[in-house]
Image: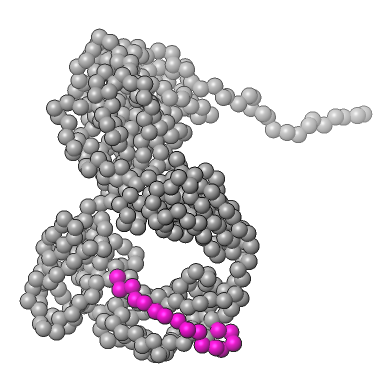
Amino acid sequence: MISNCANRGRPSGGIKDVTPPTIVKSDPENQSVNFDGDEIKIQFDEYIKIKNLQRQLIISPPMDPIPEITPLGNASKDIKIKITDTLSPNTTYTFNFGNSIVDNNEENPFPYYKYVFSTGDYIDSLSVKGQIIDATLKKPDDFVSVMLYEVDSTLTDSIIYNKQPRYITNTLDSTTTFTLENLKAGKYLMVAIKDENQDYKFQPKTDKIAFQDTYVDVPTDSLFTLKLFKEELDPKIIRPRLISGEKIGFGYEGPYKNVQIKVLSEVPDNYEYRITKDAKSDTLNYWYKPRLEVDSLLFNVTNTDYSEDFTVKISEQTRDTLTVSASPAGSINFNQDFEISGSVPFTNFDKEKVRILDKDSLAVTFSTKLDSITNTYIFNFEKKESERYKIEILPEAFTDFFGDTNDTLRYNLNTKTFADYGNLRVILKNAEYPAIVQLVTEQGEVKYELYSTKPEPLDFRHLETGDLFLRVIYDANENGKYDPGKFLERRQPERVSYYPKIQEIRSNFDLIVEFTLL
């Protein structure tokens, strides 16, 4: 007898469902006018659920309080919207759900569903379109809110900080373009923000902002480009406090280079102080001596257009001890300096107690300079190919603010060959000067930088291998750095242009790039 065995396998489960849910009925119907209710019900042909509603849902104009929307997390065939805000008369409202509505089984989205109603007798139908770009990055953030504020008697410069807009939309996560729809005719202020806490109000500490220079007259056929940037905060000191013995930390916002800290309390004639910047936080460390038998000290802190007095409680605490760190470690580039930093301000350096020797034990000539704000000594010396350097620092070469000194320190460095690096020559055409020319990562981190005041070839030498982007900043105020914009001053950020192609830096390879700026 012959028997046949069945083939082993798993049931297929049928064809995968790729069909999104369908709306069966809405009550009231979508696009309804003369709306005067407080509840909306939307019925689907299958079980659905709502995902990421907080990020995806856009209500325009915004409602306060936000309507209660169900279901959240549970499967249902209905979406219910319970409105608790008092609706404005003769106003068109939109609920744009983005991609938050999905079916229960396969999570197929019902994309960009929008429910619209009007409290008046017609639906506003005008629109405004545009795109978002970033002032310094090649790719802007996603989920950028674009907002319109009505230009009327209530419009003030502070409106973006404390009031919600008349209309709002969002780029979501799929595009850098935007469309504001269902608008009524009028004149508007257009602002975009990367709204980190999603309250439709500008928070300079956390949010990026963009704005249109002129008011927008609706209807319009213009396409608007909004340039997103992070404002530099206004100077401010935050909660100064005693951190350790004779060391007070002054937290700060905004630029710190012009900060002046003056003690107003009566102090002895031999009173001294130093100010350094903390390496890990936005804090200025104020060091003083001798130890004072007082309960508190009164300070006046000034910066550009800023002045404030502070009282700091004083108690007996242990002083910081001197620790020394060095950078770089191991390999050093030909265009790189060796640096030594201290945990307590340096007050004296004995160069005679430092030796730099090459692999033949020959002394290498070097020079030093102190960056007092970072408390770093910078060692500059000529570096040769395939060389080894030994740096020996004897005890008491460094003396800190409290009189402590270093122990013996030894560091070993080596160089590669010129062929291990790449070189890039940049030739700018149609440029405005002065210009800051940078090689940056995709995230905007500056790796190399040159400053130019006139047409000239710009040579980046001894570059580490890897992919970098070339960008040029027009230094309009000639201060040697990029300056963001300021909404209250209606000042746009300085212009930044990216070369369209990535720069592939390869070892033993020279690149020449001609960059024509528009």
Indicate left or right for 14 with 268 as reference.
right
* Residue 417 in sight here: yes
Q: Quick one: quadrant of the N terminus? A: top right
Q: Position of residue 102 (x, y in %)?
A: 46, 27
Q: Residue at x 42, y 55 (%)?
A: 454
Q: Position of residue 37 (x, y in %)?
A: 24, 15
Query: In the rendered structure, which segment of residues is drawn in magenta?
Result: 358-373
Quadrant containing the C terminus is top left
Query: Main structural element of the magenta stretch: helix, strand or loop?
Result: loop
432 above or below 311?
above
Exactly how many numbered labels are in the figure? Answer: 0
Q: Residue at x 30, y 67 (%)?
A: 278
Quarter location, residue 134: top left
Residue found at the far front of this picture: 455
Task: Give the percent coordinates (x, y) of residue 97.
Answer: 39, 26
461 or 215, nearer to the observer: 461
